[in-house]
Amino acid sequence: MSTRVTPSSTTIPSVPHTAAGATAFRYVALTTEVADAVRATLTSPRYGHPAHVEVAKGHGPCRHCLRTFDVGQERRILFTLDPFDGLEYARSAAVKS
């Protein structure tokens, strides 16, 4: 059983974004608690799935600091996360037909 660590929007960076013709929304960074848990365990904090470490193949952004990655130079950790866990938002899923 994994420890449940959820994202928080308090006192962490966020970046506003508005697409043409769309409602404005904010990118909210993951808490340091979540980022540190993933770095320490190399597993997703809610699901316990293994994380994958690789050299960045794209610019990002990092979900903790919201800065882009230096492609081919910086390492990143990819992991499963549901930023809406505990909130009443629709989620998508797939099953074989």
Image: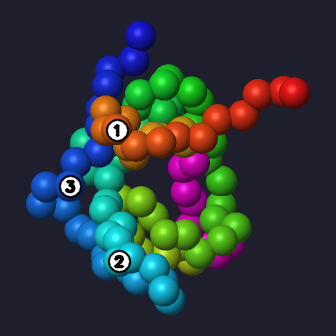
Quadrant that contains the C terminus: top right
Point out the frontmost of discs 3 and 2: 2
Q: Which residues are magenta?
A: 71-78
Q: Residue at x 64, y 35 (%)?
A: 93
Q: Is residue 54 above or below residue 62?
A: above
> Which residue is at the front of the view, 41 or 63?
63
Decide: few, some or many residues near mark 2? Use Cα within 10 Å; few <14, some 14-19, many ≥20: few
Snapshot colouring: rainbow
Q: Could you tell whether 32 is left or right of 19 in the image?
A: left
**Residue 72 lies in the magenta stretch:** yes
Q: Residue at x 48, y 86 (%)?
A: 21
Residue type at the position of mark 2: Ala
CA gap between label 1 and label 2 equals 19 Å
The tag earlier along the polypeptide, 3 or 2, is 3
Question: What residue is disc 3 on?
Answer: 9
Estimate the x, y position of residue 14 in percent, counting from the top left. Answer: 27, 70
**Residue 89 lies in the magenta stretch:** no
Q: Is residue 19 above or below residue 52?
A: below
Quadrant that contains the N terminus: top left
Numbered mark located on residue 24 in the image: 2
> Which residue is at the front of the view, 45 or 56?
45
Numbered mark located on residue 88 in the image: 1
CA gap between label 3 and label 2 equals 16 Å
